[in-house]
């Protein structure tokens, strides 16, 4: 299976057109775009100081409705240090978060091994958490902070209903639990909720956003919150080794990405819903959720995976189009993949994608 | 004094020619150089994987005589996680390091607050540590690891004599103390010791090197050691939030910087020695050490600082040359600054610098 997967991933990577994600840009062109985007008199930050980075931080703080913001190399750093600050304030090292949180799945247990915190999983693995889930965890042993992800990547970009979210945040605030928003893909939420970024982030004490996912940056994150919190975060940033001599390439890429992609988010939500409908109309494809909440969804393909990948490789070589993505899970009778709508979809008209999907289904799935 | 210092720093920054450091390159030109340096088919790393970063890591491992290497965003991260690995192995959280170590002065006590380690200062603040200093600390309570910096930045780039260093490392190895080399400016050492990088690093279990100081990179570091150690370091790197989606801009800058600057190091040692001699011949200037051990030294300027800075500002405005650097310490009768020789010095012939120094001394110091 490993070989077949490698071949499948390579075939996906060779396609000029892809249904998911942002359009690929070579490293050389990425760097050229950054060089072009920078003004001749703009200077690189020095250890996080200078107008290039500080103006961008201020722009983000304003956009997210917070007093202050801090640009950091990664979300892992941003969120762990946010949790650490809240826990130190509370003299309580217990944080609540969903079982699929990035902190639990993708950070080698940094929250525990490095930051000395304790995690209370909130709610079932395959659904948005409820107020009851939060209350149960807090009752078992008080929580210092609660980390909620919007949209929830590992469960197909689902969002809790707005009123439920508001009620959860109100309850947490009443309990003195600090609220942090994992907004790695927060950019997708305003269109989904019909609320501004600052209205959504306003429910939380702090928020982290990322620039290399929806926005096509290179790496980097912003953490926003009140002034005291961000001052504390600067100290922890230095401790974590994230106060780099210069973050300028990441800042420039983030700034350009924000300009290029943020305005496209509502359109991409519509694309995601349209595309999920197309998939669900085809035998053997089913999306999760059935109607996407945001610009992303997950997909189950009922098939014999070896045969599917082999036929799909042939089809892709012939058509130069990638209609699925590398699977994150494979079993004997199905494979699962994640689709996030970005600029790549916009390279072709919808009718062309529809036609291709039908042909792909005919050739590969039947 | 604060205003005078700001004005002095600004005047230094405006000069086209500077005696110290590498030549300034604008951010736009830096990014343009990176774009030019990348081959059209080179791809950015994805979370630290890919030939661009892995080939560079291998090149560094070989250069430093180690089995494996890891590119990271910062030295703070590299060194703290190296210490953490050694301390976990030893089930002992005590590390020995010089009182001027970066870990004690510039990292908000990350080793303690984040990594839970305990520091034993080794030796006097203003001199290289001796074997006796190390033995005393180890006898007081056993050390898990010893971190030595070569050259020692905060004491004017001094180095211990080679034989003393060898004896210290032999003793530590016999005691089972793991040895880590803070090689932020290790590039300066081969010319100073008449030994290769790998001979010097070979005395240690692990070594960290930096790319944005002597080598003119943007940020970034490499940690090198045996394979098991580097595998462990990859886990801690993820925990620290340093496993970025892509480090490509830093890798390209490091690769280019290594090619451009490493071969110049012996010449820059000669420049440092020549320059220190010039300074020491002028009344009121004195370097530390008197004869530089490496490409850097510190300088004391006996003067009334306000008057000195005011006159120096005038002189710089007239001559467009910066002959000192921003002071790291000022008192009533003197100021202190650090001089590191880099490419900036090479922009003018030595005779021109000598002439300028004499004129500067006449106009500003008398």
Image (spheres, coloured by chain):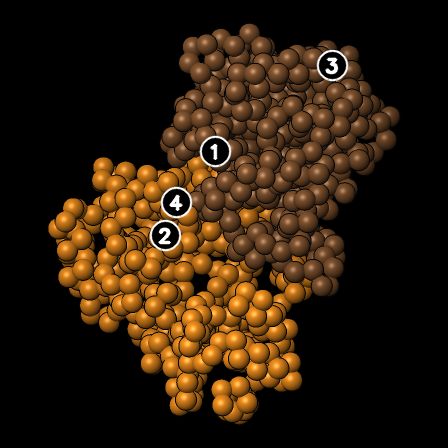
Chain colours: A brown, B orange
- The one nearer the camera, A256 or B115, is B115
Marks 2/4 in contact by CB < 8 Å: the verdict is yes
Identify residue for label 1.
A85
Q: CA distance from mark 2 to mark 4?
A: 7 Å
Q: How far is the residue under mark 3 from the one under mark 1? A: 38 Å
Q: Is residue B314 visible?
A: yes
Asked if labels 1 and 3 touch by Cβ distance under 8 angstroms, the answer is: no
Count residues near mark 3 (Cα–Cα under 10 Å), then give few for <14, some for 14-19, many for 20+. Answer: some
Dot label at residue B103: 2
CA distance for labels 2 and 1: 21 Å
Left or right? Give the position of B114 relative to B40.
left
**Is A364 situated above or below A51?**
above
Work out how far the residue at label 3 is from the one at label 2, CA to CA, in angstroms: 52 Å
Q: Please, what secondary structure does the residue beneath circle 3 have? A: loop
Q: With A258 as the anchor, is B312 left or right in this view? A: left
| Residue of label 4 | B110
Q: Return the chain for callout 3.
A: A
Q: Which residue is mark 3?
A: A291
- On the rendered structure, is B11 left or right of A344? left
In the image, residue B232 sits, relative to residue A137, either above or below, namely: below
| Residue shown at the point (55%, 48%) measured from the top left | B247
Which type of secondary structure does the marked residue at label 1 adopt?
helix
Residue A62 drawn above or below residue B2: above
Quarter holding residue A266:
top right
């Amino acid at each position: 299976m490993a070989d077949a997967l490698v071949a499948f991933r390579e075939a996906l990577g060779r396609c000029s057109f892809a249904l998911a994600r942002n359009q690929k840009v070579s490293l050389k062109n990425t760097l050229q775009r950054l060089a072009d985007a920078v003004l001749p008199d703009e200077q690189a930050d020095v250890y996080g100081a200078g107008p290039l980075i500080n103006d961008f931080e201020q722009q983000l703080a304003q956009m997210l409705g917070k007093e202050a913001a801090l640009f950091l190399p990664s979300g892992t750093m941003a969120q762990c240090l946010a949790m650490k600050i809240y826990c130190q304030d509370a003299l309580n090292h217990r944080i609540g978060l969903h079982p699929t949180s990035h902190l639990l799945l993708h950070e080698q247990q940094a929250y525990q091994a490095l930051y000395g915190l304790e995690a209370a999983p909130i709610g079932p693995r395959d659904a948005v958490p409820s107020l009851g889930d939060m209350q149960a965890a807090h009752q078992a042993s008080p929580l210092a902070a609660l980390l909620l992800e919007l949209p929830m990547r590992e469960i197909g970009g689902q969002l809790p209903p707005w009123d439920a979210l508001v009620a959860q945040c109100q309850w947490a605030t009443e309990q003195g639990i600090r609220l942090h928003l994992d907004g790695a893909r927060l950019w997708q939420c305003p269109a989904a909720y019909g609320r501004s970024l600052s209205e959504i982030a306003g429910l939380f004490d702090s928020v982290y956003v990322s620039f290399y996912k929806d926005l096509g940056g290179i790496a980097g994150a912003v953490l926003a919150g009140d002034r005291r919190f961000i001052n504390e975060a600067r100290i922890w940033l230095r401790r974590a080794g994230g106060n780099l001599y210069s973050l300028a390439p990441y800042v420039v890429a983030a700034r350009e990405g924000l300009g290029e992609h943020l305005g496209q988010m509502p359109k991409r939500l519509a694309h995601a819903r349209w595309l999920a409908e197309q998939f669900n109309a085809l035998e053997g494809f089913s999306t999760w959720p059935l109607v996407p909440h945001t610009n992303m969804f997950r997909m189950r393909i009922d098939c014999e995976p070896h045969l599917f990948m082999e036929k799909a490789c042939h089809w892709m070589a012939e058509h130069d189009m990638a209609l699925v993505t590398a699977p994150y899970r494979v079993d004997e009778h199905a494979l699962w993949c994640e689709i996030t709508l970005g600029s790549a979809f916009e390279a072709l008209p919808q009718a062309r994608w529809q036609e291709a999907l039908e042909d792909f289904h005919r050739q590969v799935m039947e």
